[in-house]
Image: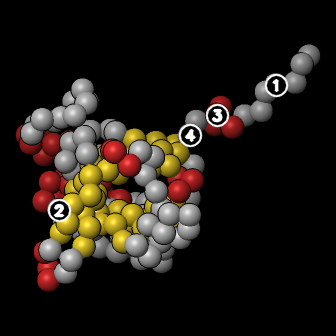
Amino acid sequence: MVAMTDAKIPTEEELRERLTPLQFEVTQHAGTERAFSGEYWDNHDPGVYSCIVCGTPLFRSDAKFDSGTGWPSFWEAIDPAKVELIEDRSHFMRRTEARCATCGAHLGHVFNDGPQPTGDRFCMNSASLRLEPDSPADDAETPAEG
Ligand code: FE
């Protein structure tokens, strides 16, 4: 696979060592974590959700919403070009699969019943993502002049 950026794409051996079995199954074999079981479906911390495999920033917490599905859900990606959309006809359904455009990791599926302004619902697996919290300094007010 040829990467479109210079992000480092780990080998399968490296991934088996670094990822949990669930993270490996979801990202490399298009698995799905059990609803309400993942790390992020009910997480409200501010930050950036990056690809667990290659580290590419994919979603902002600002675009996360409570979908009631038990999976972390977003109404938009940081950069549409970083999330590849693929028609998925598996399991007798026609769905849109979302993959990391940089490394090909399976992320989840996209549906058109999300909130405005996009109407999109990126239904992601926690196992495909890593939340990089905003540092407290980002929100700190400028110190008062002494
Ligand atoms: Fe990736």
Q: Pointers 4 and 2 in contact (CB under 8 A)? A: no
User: Disc 4 versus disc 2: distance between alpha carbons?
Assistant: 29 Å
Q: Pointers 3 and 4 in contact (CB under 8 A)? A: yes
Q: Which residue does the image show at 32% across and 38% down from the upper left?
A: 55
Q: Which residue does the image show at 35% across and 75% down from the upper left?
A: 35
User: Disc 3 versus disc 1: distance between alpha carbons?
Assistant: 13 Å
Q: Which residue does the image show at 29% across and 63% down from the upper left?
A: 108
| Residue indicated by mark 3 | 138
User: Disc 4 versus disc 1: distance between alpha carbons?
Assistant: 19 Å
Q: Quadrant of residue 73?
A: bottom left
The secondary element bearing badge 1 is classed as: loop
Quarter of the image containing the N terminus?
top left
Three-letter residue code for mark 4 = Asp
- Which sits in the foreground, 42 or 114? 114
Three-letter residue code for mark 2 = Ala
| Residue indicated by mark 4 | 134
User: Disc 1 versus disc 2: distance between alpha carbons?
Assistant: 48 Å
Q: Residues within 10 Å of mark 1 (few under 14, many from 20)?
A: few
